[in-house]
Image (spheres, rainbow, N blue to C red):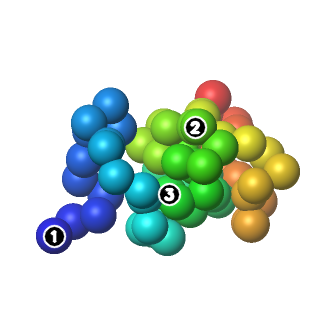
Amino acid sequence: MDDCSYLTASISETVTSTSDCDGDGVPNNVEATDGTDGQDPCSFVLASASVAPNALERC
Ligand SMILES: [Ca+2]
């Protein structure tokens, strides 16, 4: 199963995936906690990024 293939709006269970599908430096489970979109590289809480987000220049 591809843990990067899902519809954010359809999530009904706790997100445990630590993949960073959108490459914004914040893993999916943290994005779920923050209420940001794990498939939108422009949607994240900067304080939660574990690596420097390389998506900022694209947003
Ligand atoms: Ca995101």
**Upstream in sequence: badge 3 or badge 2:** 3
How far apart marks 3 and 2 lie (CA) works out to: 9 Å
- Left or right of 18? Residue 49 is right
Outermost residue to the left: 1
**Upstream in sequence: badge 1 or badge 2:** 1
The front one of 18 and 51 is 18
Report the residue marked by disc 2: 36
How far apart marks 1 and 3 lie (CA) works out to: 15 Å
Residue beneath the point at 25% across and 47% down: 6
Residue 18 rendering spot, x and y as whole percentages: 49, 70
- Asked if one can make out residue 3 in the rendered structure from this viewpoint, the answer is yes
How far apart marks 1 and 2 lie (CA) works out to: 22 Å
The front one of 9 and 57 is 9
- Asked if one can make out residue 21 in the rendered structure from this viewpoint, the answer is no
Report the residue marked by disc 1: 1
Report the residue marked by disc 3: 28
**Upstream in sequence: badge 1 or badge 3:** 1
- Left or right of 10? Residue 29 is right
In the displayed structure, 21 sits above or below 59; it is below
Q: What residue type is labelled 1?
A: Met
Outermost residue to the front: 13
Find numbered disc 2 in the image and state the secondary structure of the residue it sits on.
loop
